[in-house]
Structure formats: structure tokens, C-alpha cells
Amino acid sequence: MAANNLIQIKRTSVSGRAPNTSILHIGELALNMADGILYSSNGVAVFEIGSNNTNVNVSANLTIKSVVANGTIGTYGQMLLSNSSGSFWHSLFSEGPFPPANPVYGDIWYSTTFSKPYMWSTDGGSSFWYDFLPFSG
């Protein structure tokens, strides 16, 4: 008779289902096959292992080669912003004779026509380009 060397861990094929500490004991493993997430427990909390994690807590340094938001990698001078529907890349600073289209609060535009910077701001419901260096020395 052949030895049964099969090791099985707790598992589910229901997307979104995750174990808690009453189900997953210290050092046990559980797999959500639908989501591709492997879990374990330290007795106090359940945590995800490996790639495809839904939440990541980094307690030391983090080095990232690139960040993809909505299918694109940001370019020089852009910052990652978030709204209620997702994250997107946005250029914080621009320059030229005309202000950029679709600015968001805090954008900076350097007017090459007037040789000075402006910031996009809001005040009581209205939005405008604010000359934040009004004085010259």
C-alpha cells in the first residue's frame, strides 16, 4: 500500500471569504482558492501571506520599482491621487502660456506669459487660479 503523503490545509472556493482567529489557530494555513490568498494566524490576528494580498502592513522600509494605477505607471512630476472611485496619476506642476485643463485643488501652474506661479484653489464653492506670489522684491 502506498503512503498517503497528501497534506491539505483549510480552504474555500468562495470569493471574499477569509478566516478569523476562532477558525484558524496559531501557525495554521488557510487558502481562498477563488481569490488566490493564503492566510495564517499568530493567535491574535489573521494575516495574508505572499502575493495578491488585499491589505499590506509594512513596518520597515518599502522599496517599490513602480506603481500602477488604473493600468498606467506614473511619469516624472506626477503624483498618485485618490477619489471615491479609485486612484489616478495627476501632474501637480505644469508650465506654459495657458493654465492646464481640469485642475484639482493644490495644482501649481507657472505662467510663462506673466513669469509667475499660480495655485488652483477653492473658496466658498468657486475655484480659481490664485497668484500665490503677489509681491515682487
Image (spheres, rainbow, N blue to C red):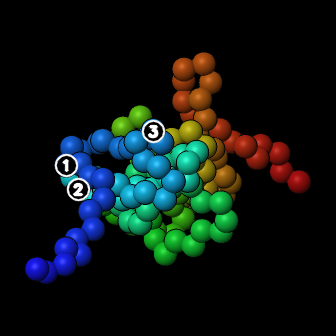
**Label 2 CA crowd tier, 10 Å (few <14, some 14–19, many 20+):** some
What's the CA distance linking mark 1 and mark 2?
Answer: 5 Å
Which residue type carries mark 3?
Ser
The answer to whether residue 29 is visible is yes
Q: Nearer the viewer, residue 75 or 42?
A: 42
Q: Position of residue 85 (x, y in %)?
A: 36, 38
Residue to which mark 3 is pinned: 22
Nearer the observer, disc 3 or disc 2?
3
Hey, what amino acid is under mark 2?
Answer: Met
Q: Is residue 33 left or right of residue 90?
A: left
Of residues 100 and 135, the one nearer the viewer is 100
Res 86 visible: no
Q: Earlier in the sequence, mark 3 or mark 1?
A: 1
Q: Amino acid at mark 1?
A: Ser
* Residue named by callout 2: 33
Q: Nearer the viewer, residue 61 or 14?
A: 14
Q: For numbered disc 2, what is the local secondary structure?
A: loop
Q: Quadrant of residue 95?
A: bottom right
**Quarter occupied by the N terminus:** bottom left
Distance of label 3 from label 2 (alpha carbons): 20 Å
Rounded to the nearest angstrom, the CA distance separating label 3 from label 1 is 19 Å
* Mark 1 vs 2, N-terminal side: 1
* Image point (23%, 48%), residue name: 12
What residue lies at 52% left-to-right and 71% top-to-bottom?
64
Res 28 → quadrant: bottom left
Label 1: which residue? 13
